[in-house]
């Protein structure tokens, strides 16, 4: 069965990682995956990881302007030549394009965000609202919308989009991380880590503010991995020498395995890949009280705790101060177990494969 995955690019991001997790775990005897991107790859691309797995990746190679004029015709030609059994899209550009094609091929769309939260924060109120309305319109034309979390499924339901939740999954690597501790060995313990783009939605400034205060009276280090437009601002806010803003790194998992706790103050998420990766590395998580974080905490309160964003830094500071009382000695193993049992990429991919098969059978 041929599955065609349509995306804008394979830029390094949570959605690109999740797509890789789906394809990596496909039953190769039953499913043949092809990925087509609409535009050339950006500098920070994960295409090499797809190549390593032998995934057939094609591209229309269109600029944004060319895409407006040619993408519909070019993609239609590609679909006709490939003759896929299923088309699976993710992302605003790909979803919108498929909604205009009217292809008879069964179409699956994965929603990885809540557009009315994500787009206004990223693109401004007016443009973001228009983009969100456009995306919802495309979803309403798709009969098989999947949401990456129960949270997103519920939010889309408010706009009369019926979405089936298939929770994001994390890839469990087999190789050891025995050298991980050396990466952060000069940093004072306990080590708290946060991973994500340095953009307003990730709310890293709250973390920096809280840890500035926390480190006045307590030991430890905060490591922030990721880059983005807010990096310079965050660096200027960091009063403590124990706040380390390291930018993007290729070996995130090694840093996770070297840390003690994961922390996220995000304002909005689908089902955050970075939190799931932290759990898989055995990191108990301190998470802001957004619905997707509550979804994780509901699966196991033993390895995650929630702080209220509307308390500013107060509740997070309280959690940090009481960290040893909040998490028992087995919290780390509980985190790993949660990642393996509930949020595994293998389990996620199997659910998609069942969906593909049911659509073809019907």
Image (tube, grey):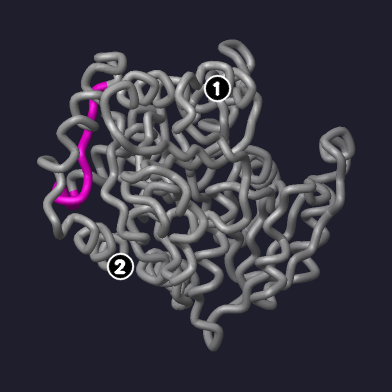
* Rendered location of residue 79, percent (x, y): 74, 62
At x 30%, y 18%, the residue is 313
Residue 307 in magenta? yes
| Secondary structure state at the residue bearing disc 1 | helix
Q: Quadrant of the C terminus?
A: bottom left
At x 58%, y 40%, the residue is 246
Res 133 quadrant in image: top right
- Give the mark, 2 or 1, whose residue is nearer the N terminus: 1
Question: Which residue is at the front of the view, 354 or 270?
Answer: 270
Residue 215 in magenta? no
Residue 362 visible at all: no
Query: With respect to residue 315, does 277 lie above or below?
Result: below
Query: With respect to residue 1, does 166 lie above or below?
Result: above
Task: Count the marks.
Answer: 2
| Secondary structure state at the residue bearing disc 2 | helix
Query: With respect to residue 264, does 229 lie above or below?
Result: above
Disc number lying in front (2 or 1): 1
Residue 94 visible at all: yes
Q: Quadrant of the N terminus?
A: bottom right
Judge left or right: residue 215 versus residue 224: left
Return the residue at label 1: 234
Q: CA distance from mark 2 to mark 1?
A: 34 Å
At x 54%, y 42%, the residue is 225
* Rendered location of residue 255, percent (x, y): 48, 54
Magenta residues, start to end: 299-308
Question: Which residue is at the front of the view, 238 or 216?
Answer: 216
Judge left or right: residue 46 versus residue 168: right
Judge left or right: residue 291 versus residue 136: left
Return the residue at label 2: 340
Identify the residue at the far top of this view: 126
């Amino acid at each position: 069965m041929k599955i065609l995955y349509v995306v804008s690019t394979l830029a390094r991001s949570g959605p690109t990682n999740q797509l890789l997790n789906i394809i990596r775990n496909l039953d190769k005897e039953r499913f043949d995956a092809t990925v087509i991107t609409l535009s050339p790859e950006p500098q920070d691309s994960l295409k090499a990881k797809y190549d390593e797995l032998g995934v057939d990746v094609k591209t229309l190679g269109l600029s944004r302007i060319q895409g407006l004029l040619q993408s519909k015709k070019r993609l239609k030609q590609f679909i006709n030549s490939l003759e896929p059994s299923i088309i699976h899209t993710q992302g605003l550009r790909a979803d919108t394009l498929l909604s205009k094609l009217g292809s008879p091929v069964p179409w699956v769309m994965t929603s990885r965000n809540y557009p009315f939260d994500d787009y206004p924060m990223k693109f401004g109120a007016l443009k973001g609202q228009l983009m969100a309305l456009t995306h919802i319109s495309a979803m309403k034309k798709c009969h098989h919308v999947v949401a990456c979390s129960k949270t997103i499924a519920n939010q889309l339901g408010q706009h009369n989009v019926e979405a089936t939740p298939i929770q994001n999954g994390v890839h469990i690597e087999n190789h050891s991380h025995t050298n991980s501790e050396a990466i952060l060995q000069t940093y004072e313990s306990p080590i708290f880590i946060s991973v994500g783009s340095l953009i307003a939605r990730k709310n890293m400034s709250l973390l920096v503010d809280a840890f500035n205060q926390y480190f006045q009276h307590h030991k430890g280090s905060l490591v922030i991995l990721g880059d983005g437009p807010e990096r310079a601002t965050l660096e200027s806010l960091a009063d403590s020498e124990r706040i380390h803003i390291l930018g993007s790194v290729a070996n995130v998992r090694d840093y996770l395995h070297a840390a003690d706790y994961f922390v996220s103050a995000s304002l909005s998420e689908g089902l955050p890949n970075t939190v799931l990766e932290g759990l898989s590395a055995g990191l108990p998580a301190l998470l802001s009280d957004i619905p997707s974080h509550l979804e994780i905490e509901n699966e196991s309160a033993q390895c995650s705790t929630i702080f209220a964003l509307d308390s500013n830094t107060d509740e997070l500071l309280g959690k940090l101060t009481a960290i040893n009382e909040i998490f028992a000695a087995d919290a780390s193993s509980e985190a790993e177990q949660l990642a393996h049992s509930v949020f595994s990429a293998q389990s996620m991919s199997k659910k998609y494969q069942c969906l593909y098969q049911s659509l073809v059978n019907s």
